[in-house]
Image: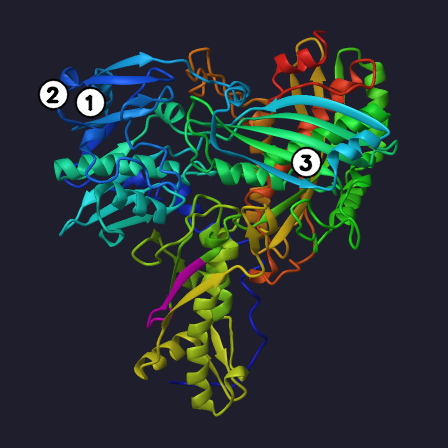
Amino acid sequence: MNAHKVTGQPAPATAGVSHPHESARAQVAGGATYIDDIPEVRGTLHAAPVMSTVAHGRLRGVDASAALALPGVRGFFSAADIPGARHFATPKHDEPVFAIDRVEHVGQVVGVVVAQTFQQARHAARLVKLQIDELPALLTPQAAHAAQSYVLPPVQVARGDATAALAAAAHVISGQFEVGGQEHFYLEGQVAYVLPQEQRQWLVHSSTQHPGEVQHWVAHALGLDGHAVRVECRRMGGGFGGKETQAGHVAVWAAVAAHHLGCAVKMRLDRDDDFMITGKRHPFAYDYTVGFDPDGLVRGLRLDMLANCGFSADLSGPVADRAIFHADNAYFLSDVAITSYRCKTHTQSHTAFRGFGGPQGVIVIESILGDIARHLGLDPLDVRRRNLYGITERNVTHYQMPVEDNILAPLMAELERTSAYRRRRAELDAWNADSPVIKRGMALTPVKFGISFTATLFNQAGALVHVYTDGSVQVNHGGTEMGQGLNTKVAQVVADELGVPLARVMATAADTAKVPNASATAASSGTDLNGRAAQFAARRVRENLAAFVAGLDGCGAGAVQFAGGQVRTPKATRSFDEVVLAAYANRIQLWSDGFYRTPKIHYDKTTMQGRPFYYFAYGAACTEVAIDTLTGENRVLRVDILHDVGRSINPAIDIGQIEGGFVQGMGWLTTEELVWDARGRLATHAPSTYKIPATGDVPAHLKVALWPEPNREDNVFGSKAVGEPPFMLAISVWEALRDAVARARPGTGPVRMDAPATPERVLRALGGR
């Protein structure tokens, strides 16, 4: 191995730089492989679902004879054909793989038809006749609550004496409102491709955020041990929480068919079927009473939250828990009583969605503070600042977690300055005075979002780092790539740990045969967990190489530096590739595993107290909107965001996540309306009736700045999670719209409006103008 004298300065770090997404070029060129792009093996069949047309009823019989008579149809499979457990392997075991003797929502899957082509299977599935005796259906959380129909028991969290505080308060207001659900609308729909392997083993290609759960569910349904099922996912075309549990359903349905037919089976849901079958963001209904001082300080709050969970528990427990945890958002609540009802309705089983209950918690306190400000005739920003968490006092949440990293006050003050909030508020007053029809509104709202899975056991991750003899590096971890840039960030961390250029590091597909028992890529913790695990794996390899080189040069291992593809000691500099090849010749281990578990967290599910989060991510958004008081139409005019991502691993990716999260949140609160008719049928089940934001809805002025401070906790690279927190910045749109409504009508009372703020709802809030 050749050596030369040390020259020059260490190369700059890879992390902290806006490198392109690792798949960007392939995606633009059409070379990035998704599940439906995988070449099909000879004999592959296709499955399509047979769905209930009734919201609630007894399943008396199924007649598939007409479907089975069609050319190309190979079989129909239902509950009686499941070789293993007939319920999905969820914690409550309350969701059947296929409907057994009862259907509980329109779109519930009763069975699958399998045919030679996708079109044949879909056509045949429509010919299967279901005999169902219809039963009364509960379609709203209010109806379910009145009937005491719950998927899980109610939960109460309290601090202080809310009743006494309300009685003593100078001002008291009460209100009720609802926020709707949201369809995930991932570009790539739900899909799985199941292939039989030798000796009763299975390979499952699944578009999933949780390969380990798909593995567990498929094994459970087929009556196999987990080691007989391997699940792989290179990338998803979007997930947003909708492929955390829901992806497992499609994989299990395809696996049951493949088990019986002894061949590969693919199941890809048509967009309409995807809408009808899969769960959405949980709709919530609220009933609150709040007491406050003349300066807007909240003294007491009593809050009931009704979560519309659908027909089974799915992830509704932790979603509703997180809504409780985030009902404070950025504000100290001294005397508070929150009751959460997890309502069972006869609709799709609602599930994870970006924010995971957090948005449903944040929006209620922001709405309350907005109405307090209007009641008192104060600027809403002043009321919000009056209620912020403190630094040394008023700094413990209602679930007894100290807020130790609070940057809310300076962050909001900086955004107030850079957005020219005060000047523009005055300008809005002048505009509205001269504009009889178009009215403008404005709001600046903060976000405090807890980072970690509230289920403590999921806060762990593993990774493998392999260094090959040519010096190239491969990293595999338990996280999944859904467009959010996880693999890019992990590769950046590994490149820096080994001191090699980013181009020398490749991240590979999530694979249960490589990293077992991985948690879902969710809770905004993908980089925190998997990036740290990969860093630890790379560090072990680096330490092996450092010890080897130190022995060659007679120095301590701590004196060996890795940077810019070079390995430097006080004596010499060698290329990383040279060192690796020499280490291999000397039988030095060039691969390692890494494992990480989040520190400090603890949480008692019984009392709902403890430290469920490792840290908080903060942010704020200032939004200006306009409404047409004759039609209710509205538009977002300008958005200024200041967001806390810690020390950014990849600023371009982080800013993209902030922009995308904000726009998706804007859609939730303005245009994305889910409508079920009186018989429980989802009427908005296609792009023609369900409207996500388009490019024309994005304001011309959308400015994002990053807060310049590292994470105060010991997180990978000093970064903070960025997937979910920006979603709640869009609540500034909601509050700006309510501000515009208030400015358009006389009086100072609360603005009564449900979300999303469709033109019809804006008109109703204006009093029918």
Q: Which mark is residue 520?
A: none
Verify CB contact (< 8 Å) between mark 3 and mark 1. no
Residue identifier under label 2: 71
Say which residue appears at 86% left-offset and 21% top-offset: 430
- Tell me the quarter of the picture where residue 272 sits: top left
Could you tell me the amino acid type at mark 1? Gln
Q: Is mark 1 on a helix, strand or loop?
A: helix
Question: Which amino acid, mark 2?
Answer: Pro
Question: Which quarter of the picture shows residue 31?
Answer: top left
Q: Residues within 10 Å of mark 3 (few under 14, many from 20)?
A: many
Magenta stretch holds residue 462: yes
Q: How crowded is mark 1: few (under 14 residues within 10 Å), some or many (20 or more)?
A: many
Q: What element carries label 2?
A: loop
Q: Give, as a three-letter code, the residue at label 3.
A: Ala
Q: Which numbered dot is residue 337?
A: 3
Residue 586: give x, y in percent of width and height. 32, 84
Q: What segment carries the magenta color?
A: 461-471
Q: Please name whichever residue, 500 or 356, is drawn nearer the observer in this view of the structure.
A: 356
Query: Which is more N-terminal, label 3 or label 2?
Result: 2
Q: Residue at x 50, y 31 (%)?
A: 281
Q: In the rendered structure, does residue 310 fall within the stretch colored magenta?
A: no
* Residue topped by disc 1: 120
